Image (tube, coloured by chain):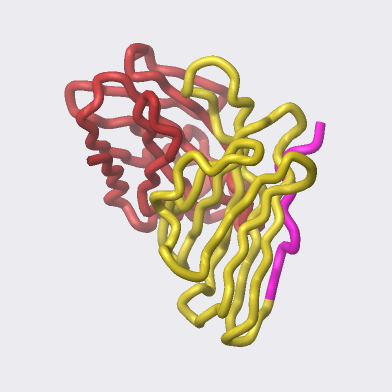
Amino acid sequence: NAGVMQNPRHLVRRRGQEARLRCSPMKGHSHVYWYRQLPEEGLKFMVYLQKENIIDESGMPKERFSAEFPKEGPSILRIQQVVRGDSAAYFCASSPGQGASQETQYFGPGTRLLVL
Amino acid sequence: AQKVTQAQTEISVVEKEDVTLDCVYETRDTTYYLFWYKQPPSGELVFLIRRNSFDEQNEISGRYSWNFQKSTSSFNFTITASQVVDSAVYFCALRDFGNEKLTFGTGTRLTIIP
């Protein structure tokens, strides 16, 4: 039973380029979450999505960042015109989404983004 | 507002010693969930435990145990007979009922010295 998959594991971009991070949730999971971990810090919530819907994007920067979770295919976190401050580890998590809201979130291995 | 405090930034202990990682949380909700995750040097996050606010029983899983004290808003994690493989960063996290986002502490880096 495969866990949460993220790719690429490492991504290097120059300032001004676009970064696209992919996340495939665990089988049977319909809820996806993105978190960002800056160096030597804890994880910070960015966005929560269900299939074709953004449910909570209160942690997303207002500009340059977007996320989607289409009906088919992985969830995508897109960062346009990257800046050095975007360098971080980006983690995706998924949960089953059935029943009450207390299901555990299971995390992928993360994508380490380095902006030169 | 939710807040999780892990006051211990780094801890080092010699192998086979016991070690306790502290976690203190703040929330206005009466129903909430607490979590511990492990981040080994390879970087992934590994789920360890979830505790519901209405269940104050302590839990033991092998060498791991968790002490949930609602009166002091603490959810501490103890590793007994530590091993080198326990070396990692450990995160405590909180989620309020009805709110899907996790609020993480800043983590405690645990180093087990052989």
**Percent of width and height locating residue B103:** 38, 43
Residue A44 position in % (x across, y down): 42, 53
> Position of B9 compared to B79: left or right?
left
The image quadrant that residue A17 belongs to is bottom right
B86 w.r.t. B42: above or below: above
Q: Does the magenta run of residues contain B10?
A: no
A78 or B88, nearer to the observer? A78
Where A98 sits versus B25, above or below? above
Count of numbered labels shown in the rendering: 0
Image quarter for residue A95?
top right
**Quadrant location of the C terminus of chain B in the rendered image:** bottom right
Residue A97 shown left or right of residue B7 in the figure:
right
Between B73 and A110, the residue placed more toward the observer is A110
In the image, residue B5 lies at what x, y percent? 28, 46
Q: In this view, does B48 lie to the left or right of A14?
A: left
Is residue B46 left or right of B110 when viewed as pictured?
A: right
Between A56 and B33, the residue placed more toward the observer is A56
For chain A, give the colour.
yellow
Residue at the (55%, 50%) spot, across then down? A34
| Residue B20, picture quadrant | top left
Residue B72: image location, x then y, percent: 18, 28
Is A7 in the magenta? Answer: yes
Q: Is residue B86 visible?
A: yes
Question: Could you tell me which residue is drawn at 49 percent across and 39 percent down?
Answer: A55
Does the rendering let one see residue B83? no
In the image, residue A34 above or below residue A112: above
What residue range appears in magenta? A1-11
Q: Which residue is drawn at 46% across and 77% down?
A: A85
The N terminus of chain B sits in image quarter:
top left
Chain displayed in red: B
